Image (cartoon, coloured by chain):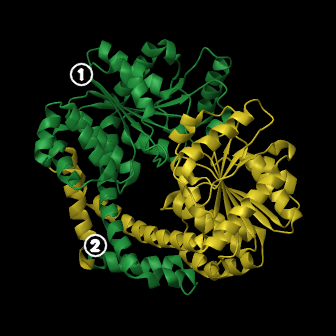
Chain colours: A green, B yellow
Amino acid sequence: MEPSELVDRILAGDRRAIARAISMVEDGAEGLAELSAGLFPHTGRAYTVGLTGSPGVGKSTLAGELVRAARARGLRAAVLAIDPTSPFTGGALLGDRVRMQDHATDPGVFIRSMATRGHLGGMALATPEAVRVLEAAGFELVLVETVGVGQAEVDVAAATDTTLVVVTPGWGDAVQVAKAGILEIADVFVVNKADREGAEAAVRDLEQMLRLGPPLDWTPPVVKTVAAAGEGIDDLWVAIDEHRRHLESSGELERGRRARLLREVESLAVEALRARARALLDANPDVVDDVLERRTDPYRAAAALAERLGGGAM
Amino acid sequence: MEPSELVDRILAGDRRAIARAISMVEDGAEGLAELSAGLFPHTGRAYTVGLTGSPGVGKSTLAGELVRAARARGLRAAVLAIDPTSPFTGGALLGDRVRMQDHATDPGVFIRSMATRGHLGGMALATPEAVRVLEAAGFELVLVETVGVGQAEVDVAAATDTTLVVVTPGWGDAVQVAKAGILEIADVFVVNKADREGAEAAVRDLEQMLRLGPPLDWTPPVVKTVAAAGEGIDDLWVAIDEHRRHLESSGELERGRRARLLREVESLAVEALRARARALLDANPDVVDDVLERRTDPYRAAAALAERLGGGAM
């Protein structure tokens, strides 16, 4: 199928076309730039929410409940579950199958796992592209769920309007939370499985950590949920909505989206140059041999390479 | 202090000079390229071991015990604890203070937290540089500890010879492990806190996941430890040593180190070009305005930028 035909089908909401486009994003497939360019004018209208937290905190269940809440409000909703690349499992699709059942017959819902095996820019570049496929297909709320603590969270936070950080009671004390570096990316904290012992302590710890930090324009609320029982979802919806209104009234929504696009253009350009750098190094193995044998050092070798790549622009 | 003087002091094992150099790496300070070049001829001899796993699994305690094991074998050992950037805590130094006490008076031990606020290339580039500072200072074993599941692990795995993946009983079922994408980066699995219920089940799950995967030249052993009680550390030491001998006899040690240096040179060159890309975008806000207003798309804007940056090389 030609990219232009694929674009038309996605705009018409064709589910197989959407799935195929996201696979192209995953693989960094040929035709991706054309597909992306074709969809781009039809994007920018969805609201995006990131869900992040350690494995087992219940992000998938929470995402399913937020989809239900969106549907109850007449909104079309999609979930993009970002999985770290795993050659063992081929990208954990198990979770998908489990979650799909609930919403399988609803054309207003689309749930999809995404790995980032082939995309040159990794998750940071693949995620916004996949989100735009879903936006172009008419989904008004796009949830981006990721596994892991660290860079994965930062990347998701950088790709969405509102970032939920999900923890469970007893997940870790305040020092661990701070160590994981997630305080500063959270727009809303969710203490899920809040029917377990220690939920109040977790809420208190988080609120105290926030008080100890620098003053913020927006103080992340801490919301308790029991996603598996559908409890607390309305409170969470309200918290997301309040954050959205804060972003809109402060101008942060526009500024954030502009900053994201700037970084994306920068990264796409840099990845194009990385491909050229790799080709040059492959064609000239002596460059790395010289470093390995300590005849030169990485900085000097890199400076020579950058000069060869970018010399014309300076 | 001039970089050349700092180099001399580091080679002499001066602890304050080592600390200062690692701070320069963290900050991406001026003079870093010169410092790095000065140290580079004195590197390449240490063995590096990465410790990775979720917060709370006991990586720091385990690192402390491995340091003790190294000292008992007459080896100088350093620990580099990579913390995700946290403006709230200024890089979790608390853990340091706790762990330092044990080894504080031993000149053969150096323990240090590192954040990566300022380094342009992030953790992926800062980590090998900091490791080389410690190598040049004469440490024969360098442990690199990181927090988080996902990209952080992959980066640590990419920066060390042997990667330990640390889990605890009940940390998550096999699907969660697979989902976290850590199976394929582990050279040795450690089930820490193995005196807790479920340790045998965790070992069994991991071994089964490994059997379900593709055949490997090296099958990661699964080692049980109770780091807080010093139990299982000798077994772990043997497992690391066996992996090292496997790498050496298969030629993988050399190939892996060469591949790492190649990626590092490539990334350093690319980061230099990223800085130029950022400067160009800052000077030309209309490029991003055009994308934001959907007059062009990210790919087209990036291609134009890459052309301007790297046009001379094509």
Whole-angstrom CA distance, mark 2 to mark 1, is 45 Å
Q: Are there few (<14), some (14-19), or many (20+) residues within 10 Å of tag 2?
A: many
Residue B214's spot in the image, x, y percent?
Answer: 51, 52
Give, as a three-letter code, the residue at label 1.
Pro
Residue A81: quarter of image: top left
Looking at the image, residue A105 sits to the left or right of residue B54; the answer is: left
In which quarter of the view is residue B10 placed?
A: bottom right
**Number of the label disc, if any, that sits on residue A107:** 1
Chain of the residue that carries numbered disc 1 in the rendered image:
A
Q: Is residue B313 left or right of residue B1?
A: left
Q: How many marks?
A: 2
Residue picked out by circle 2: B310
Give how far across and how far down residue B107 sits, in percent: 85, 67
User: Residue at left 82%, top 52%?
Assistant: B233
Residue B167 visible to the viewer: yes
Q: Is residue B9 above or below residue A254?
A: below
Figure quadrant of the N terminus of chain B: bottom right
In the displayed structure image, the side of residue B306 where residue B242 appears, left or right: right
